[in-house]
Amino acid sequence: MEHQSFDYIIVGGGSSGSVLANRLSENPQNSVCLLEAGPRDWSPWIHLPIGYAKTMWDPRFNWKFETEPEPAMNDRPIYWPRGKTLGGSSSINGLIFIRGQKEDYDGWRNLGNPGWGWDDVLPYFKKAEGNDRLGEPLHSKTGPLKASSIPKKHALVEAFIKTANALGVPKTEDFNNLTQEGVGYFQLSTHKGLRCSAAVAYLKPAKQRSNLTILTNSQVSKVIFENKKAFGVEFIQQGIKKTIRSNKEVILSAGAIQSPQILQLSGVGPAKLLQEFNIPVVHDLPGVGENLQDHLQFRLIYELNQPISTNIQLSSWFGKLKMGLEWLLLRGGPLSIGINQGGLFTRVMKDSKTPDIQFHMATLSADMAGGKVHPFSGFTMSVCQLRPESRGYVRIQSADPLSPPKIVANYLATQLDRDTSVAAVNFARKITQTEPMRFLVTREVKPNNPQSDEEVLEFCRNTGATIFHPTSTCQMGPDSNPMAVLDSSLRVRGVEGLRVVDCSAMPTVPSGNTNWPAVMLAERAADLILGRI
């Protein structure tokens, strides 16, 4: 392997990297090497949709990052799980099929990124999508990444939908149409009762190609440059440092935390930071690691007066057996769905023209995501602000590539973010106080009956957590933006032969879950790299 060369080297076998590995190796003339720091996606808990309650905490498949103590969160560090296996976070995430809003992508274009408006990206969303129910003009049924409808209605979700309707939120059958606002059932990245990760959708059909080499347990330590041209990478495999060369390009798809970390370790980033750790500066690029954005969720928990919660099934051997048999025999039931079934997008701030908050409605409850369920019949409403103003950063704190970077999310740093968060929690509480949900709720467990907006904000500070959507730490942008790391073709500014293709390239976080946008981004990037557009 030492000194072996490939046309394209892809760093990171997650959502974007899996897409690129498939698309770039479709032409047998292109030699492609995909490097993944974690293992293959061998665990059954990865493939069982409800299994992310296990992988959420498993260090074999999860980087288990933590932020620094967050000042506006009462100095709490926040746990940040990130996928560490083939498929990346698509192998451990909540499975939700959401693209974001049309206006998000038109916003990217208007920030000086031609080719990234809604009309430009829609064909790539559709190229990826294999939907079981929705078709043209906005959807496709033939793509590799499956989007499946939840087959069975749930009494609790039905009550949630009817209550939201009573509060003016319309019912929707598709959160991914031109108007996101509505309440209904999510579609999920599952297929025949199993998780459809990016690795399943893109790597599995491509892994036998002779021109695609997939190296797992191989953590890239730096990109190697020669006169500002990337010509290979150094990586660590079983404790041994190795290098491979690229004939055409190196592509970082290591995610919003580790792509900027690798750039900084390689000498591309803020010169002052690099000099602090005696890293030779290849190119002074101040935006690397800055502009970090994330969705901050607040989890409200309620006890029900009827045994309709998944808690009941998970709390008894009989219930678990029934769930297991339902999955084994029919590939159905709770094990085939995951945790969150109901979704809602709406506006709570008077100046918002499109939805500014999102709900994930789970038919079970636990003290923390992936934790042990409560002994009572309960449910969870998670609500988050869709377009936060707060900006954080990712910066190396050592020249050691195996040392995690410093992560500062800077949650709730602006008044708009605080006001929107309070309004979101108040709207969620209003749902439980309105018929028909009011008839089902016995007790508010979290928050504990706050009496003012100040107390609601304190609840947000004390309990808020990531909903796992970090983006924008290597943002694309025009020459006029001094913090732009990439151009609109995702090429790293100031050097040659190097791109970043993952959520870190997004100039702003999309209004919703980020997995499908990461796949779309890589689908379009493949055409850019191959010179098709």
Image (cartoon, rainbow, N blue to C red):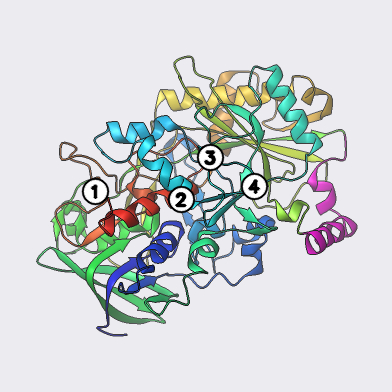
Q: Nearer the viewer, residue 325 or 203?
A: 203
Give me the disc on residue 136.
3
Identify the secondary structure beneath mark 3: loop
Give me the disc on residue 368.
4
Q: Earlier in the sequence, mark 4 or mark 2?
A: 2
Identify the secondary structure beneath mark 4: loop
Spatial CA span between label 1 and label 2: 24 Å
Q: Earlier in the sequence, mark 2 or mark 3?
A: 2
Label 1 vs label 4, nearer the camera: 1
Q: Which residues are magenta?
A: 306-330
Residue 337 pos. (x, y %): 70, 51
Spatial CA span between label 4 and label 2: 36 Å
Amino acid tagged 2: Lys
- Above or below, 372 relative to 415: below
Tell me, yes or no, whether the highlighted magenta stretch contains residue 308: yes
Q: Earlier in the sequence, mark 1 or mark 3?
A: 3
Crowding at dot 2, Cα within 10 Å, few <14 / some 14-19 / many 20+, comes out as many
Please give the name of the residue rendered at 15% of the width and 36% of the height, measured from the top-left corner: 480
Query: Image quadrant of residue 361?
Result: top right
Q: Which residue is mark 1?
A: 486
Residue 11 in sight here: yes
Say if mark 1 contacts mark 4, CB within 8 Å.
no
Q: Residue furthest top?
A: 350
Crowding at dot 1, Cα within 10 Å, few <14 / some 14-19 / many 20+, comes out as many
Q: Is residue 515 left or right of residue 109?
A: right
